[in-house]
Image (tube, grey):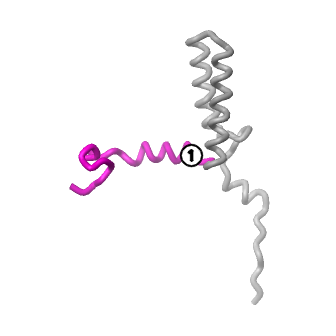
Amino acid sequence: MREQKRDPDALYVGLAKQALYKGIPFTFWLIGFVIVAECFLLTRNFWFAGSLGIVLWFVGVWLGRKDPFYLRILSIRFTKCAASRNRLYWGGNHYKP
């Protein structure tokens, strides 16, 4: 029996990727928008808030090219991996006494 070579079509490949808008995940857009809006409301300076938004965009693109799931990885790390009580003694999260 002859094996068939599977060719991934566009839908299959797209399901493995995270949804991006202009190279940044949507969750990072939301976080960046809230930060820039709060900065504008606190300082009333459009140029400062706009420049902060541009810097956040470059940071998001840089992190997104390294790993598009970085926000999900960080959220899982902070919710599932709690620090142990003896981490200051051992210099890290060691679970042995």
Amino acid found under the numbered disc labelled 1? Tyr
Residue 55, horizontal then vertical, whole percent: 64, 29
Residue at the location (67% across, 35% down)?
A: 58
Residue 25, horizontal then vertical, whole percent: 65, 40
Residue at the location (27% across, 43% down)?
A: 88
Q: Residues within 10 Å of mark 1 (few under 14, many from 20)?
A: some
- The quadrant in which residue 62 appears is top right
Asked if the magenta segment contains residue 82, the reply would be yes
Give the residue at the far bottom of this rendering.
1
Q: Where 50 falls versus 77 (above or below)?
A: above
Residue 70, horizontal then vertical, whole percent: 56, 45
Give the residue at the far top of this rendering.
44
Q: Quadrant of the C terminus?
A: bottom left
Relative depth, front residue between 97 and 69: 97
- The quadrant in which residue 14 appears is bottom right
User: Across the whole image, how many numbered discs are drawn on residues?
Assistant: 1
Relative depth, front residue between 84 and 5: 84
- The quadrant in which residue 7 appears is bottom right
Residue at the location (67% across, 14% down)?
A: 46
Q: Which residue is mark 1?
A: 70
Q: Where 7 falls versus 34 (above or below)?
A: below
Which residue range is magenta in the image?
68-97
Asked if the magenta segment contains residue 11, the reply would be no
Residue at the location (58% across, 24% down)?
A: 35
Q: Quadrant of the N terminus?
A: bottom right
**Helix, strand or loop at disc 1?**
helix
Horizontal side of 79 relative to 50 (left or right) equals left
Horizontal side of 16 relative to 95 (left or right) equals right
